[in-house]
Image (cartoon, rainbow, N blue to C red):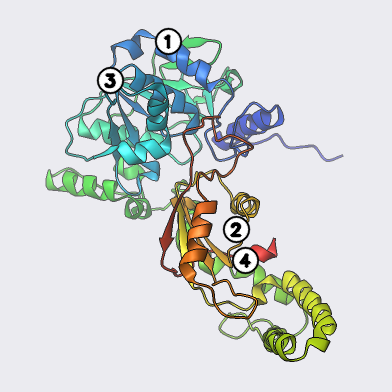
């Protein structure tokens, strides 16, 4: 009998338990897929209201709040209470923080819009390293927390890094209160202290929809940026860190990065961002390998010899189809049957489709990071919009729809502006990834912005007929 080995105790093992439990028991709002995310737990609004009743919140003038969805009610209540908020730019990839101040005379709906991610991007003013702002309170999201103040985020380390940067700026001190809002099931009795490093930020107060936990005694917080814990690769992905490194070096401080690149937090993100076009070809190579003859050349590229006959025949046949329909009406029945066969072939071999000439493109922005390309396709079909191709850049919150001109019954091209205008009109007030409501059932937030765009080089092109 083989004895089953105990599960290894790691930070990720605790995260998986929480993610699995919340998903299984339907304790989250949209997005439902919460793995590798801060869960948008049910009761987030109630937890935010309980947080707003704390003295720490009432006394604070400026609050740093993370940009995740479950903390959106906290951002709204902060603005409603006439407080300033600063929100980190996601992944710190294009800056540091956005500074948002309450709008005088704004109604409740306007403040809710301002508290959303779209509102933050529109109204927030960039906050640089030379800012002299003082932060009185920090509100974080969490995947898991312990009764004694240990916190686990989604595993990418950005909250810890943002805390260290604020310490370096002088915006906070080690005594600045850190609060997290979570569901009750996200609290565990104990997290092994050996799992945590000196750069991990603990929490001082835990707020749930039903209770408030004050951690006593408070745990020690990081004193600043620990350069020895950062790799050269991570610095290259964040301009803010490069600037801080230069500042410290000019001041004569010892800045030594770690030699071994063990930063796993951003590796998958960088891989998807920079190498996806190359990786995109790999499934095709496997598919060819399951065929018959040579599928790999000496230099490692895919040999498309097997696909070329199908590609060529289908192209020449489509041209012949137009001639038969216009010159030989009697051949219509045969052409129709063959067209169905060609359509089935196209579905079986989506990568061998003929790339149609793109006449114009539309850019869709303000897409939530939780949205998947399949949700976009379904939303477009509901609106009757059928692009030839989709260029998906979900990590940037945008995508491009590529279209060819519509043709009349005589085969002549229709005017392009008519088609573009009608498509733009069909896409007005579009929301993606919902069932009759957006992320938090808010009517004023989440509309997709649509604007004309020039055709771009592809990062990820999705053939809409392949679904």
Vertical order, 34 against 373 (above or below): above
Q: Position of residue 2 (x, y in %)?
A: 83, 40
Judged from the image, the secondary structure of the residue bearing numbered disc 4 is: loop
Question: Is there CB contact under 8 Å for labels 4 and 1?
Answer: no
Judging depth in this view, the residue of 430 and 377 nearest the camera is: 430
Determine which residue is flagged by label 1. Answer: 216
Task: Please name which of the two marks, 1 or 3, marks the residue nearer to the observer.
Answer: 3
Judged from the image, the secondary structure of the residue bearing numbered disc 3 is: loop
Judged from the image, the secondary structure of the residue bearing numbered disc 1 is: loop
> Rounded to the nearest whole Å, what is the CA distance between mark 1 and mark 3?
20 Å
Q: Earlier in the sequence, mark 4 or mark 3?
A: 3
Task: Please name which of the two marks, 3 or 2, marks the residue nearer to the observer.
Answer: 2
| Residue 381 lies in quadrant | bottom right
Horizontal relation, residue 2 to residue 180: left or right: right
Q: Earlier in the sequence, mark 1 or mark 2?
A: 1
Task: Please name which of the two marks, 4 or 1, marks the residue nearer to the observer.
Answer: 4
Q: Quadrant of the C terminus?
A: bottom right
Binning the other alpha carbons within 10 Å of mark 3 as few (below 14), some (14 to 19) or many (20 upward) gives many
Determine which residue is flagged by label 4. Answer: 463
Task: Please name which of the two marks, 1 or 2, marks the residue nearer to the observer.
Answer: 2
Residue at the (49%, 10%) spot, across then down = 212
Judging depth in this view, the residue of 363 and 166 nearest the camera is: 363
Residue at the (74%, 89%) spot, across then down = 324
Determine which residue is flagged by label 2. Answer: 385
Q: Position of residue 228 (x, y in %)?
A: 32, 44
Determine which residue is flagged by label 3. Answer: 136
Question: Is there CB contact under 8 Å for labels 4 and 3?
Answer: no
């Amino acid at each position: 009998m083989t004895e089953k080995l105990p599960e290894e105790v790691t930070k990720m093992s605790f995260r998986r338990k929480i993610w699995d439990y919340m998903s299984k028991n339907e304790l989250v709002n949209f997005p439902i897929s919460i793995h590798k995310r801060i869960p948008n737990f049910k009761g987030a609004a109630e937890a935010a209201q309980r947080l707003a009743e704390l003295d720490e919140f009432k006394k604070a003038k400026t609050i740093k709040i993370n940009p995740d969805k479950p903390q959106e009610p906290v951002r709204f209540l902060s603005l409603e209470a006439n407080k300033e908020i600063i929100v980190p730019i996601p992944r710190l990839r294009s800056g540091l923080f956005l500074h948002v101040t309450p709008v005088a005379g704004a109604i409740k709906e306007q403040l809710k819009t301002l508290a959303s991610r779209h509102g933050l991007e529109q109204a927030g003013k960039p906050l640089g390293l030379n800012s002299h702002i003082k932060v009185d309170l920090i509100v974080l999201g969490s995947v898991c927390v312990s009764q004694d103040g240990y916190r686990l985020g989604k595993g990418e380390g950005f909250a810890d890094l943002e805390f260290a940067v604020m310490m370096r700026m002088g915006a906070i001190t080690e005594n600045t209160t850190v609060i997290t809002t979570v569901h009750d099931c996200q609290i565990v009795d104990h997290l092994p202290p050996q799992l945590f490093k000196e750069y991990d930020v603990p929490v001082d107060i835990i707020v749930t929809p039903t209770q408030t936990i004050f951690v006593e005694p408070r745990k020690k917080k990081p004193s600043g940026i620990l350069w020895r814990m950062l790799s050269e690769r991570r610095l290259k992905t964040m301009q803010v860190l490069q600037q801080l490194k230069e500042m410290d070096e000019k001041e004569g401080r010892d800045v030594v990065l770690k030699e071994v690149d063990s930063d796993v937090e951003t590796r998958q993100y960088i891989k998807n961002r920079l190498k996806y076009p190359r990786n995109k070809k790999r499934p095709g190579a496997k598919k060819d390998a399951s065929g018959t003859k040579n599928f790999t050349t000496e230099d490692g590229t895919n040999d498309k010899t097997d696909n070329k006959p199908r590609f060529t025949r289908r192209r020449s046949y489509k041209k012949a189809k137009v001639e038969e329909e216009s010159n030989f009406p009697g051949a219509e029945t045969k052409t129709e049957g063959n067209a169905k066969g060609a359509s089935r072939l196209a579905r079986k071999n989506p990568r061998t489709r003929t790339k149609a000439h793109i006449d114009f493109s539309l850019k869709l922005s303000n897409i939530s990071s939780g949205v998947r390309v399949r949700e976009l396709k379904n939303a477009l079909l509901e609106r009757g919009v059928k692009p030839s191709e989709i260029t998906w850049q979900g990590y940037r919150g945008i995508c491009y729809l590529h279209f060819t001109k519509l043709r009349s019954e005589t085969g002549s091209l229709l005017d392009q502006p008519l088609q573009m205008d009608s498509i733009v009109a069909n896409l007005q007030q579009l929301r993606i990834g919902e069932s009759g409501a957006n992320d938090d059932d808010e009517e004023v937030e989440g509309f997709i912005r649509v604007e004309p765009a020039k055709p771009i080089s592809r990062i990820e092109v999705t053939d809409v007929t392949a679904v």
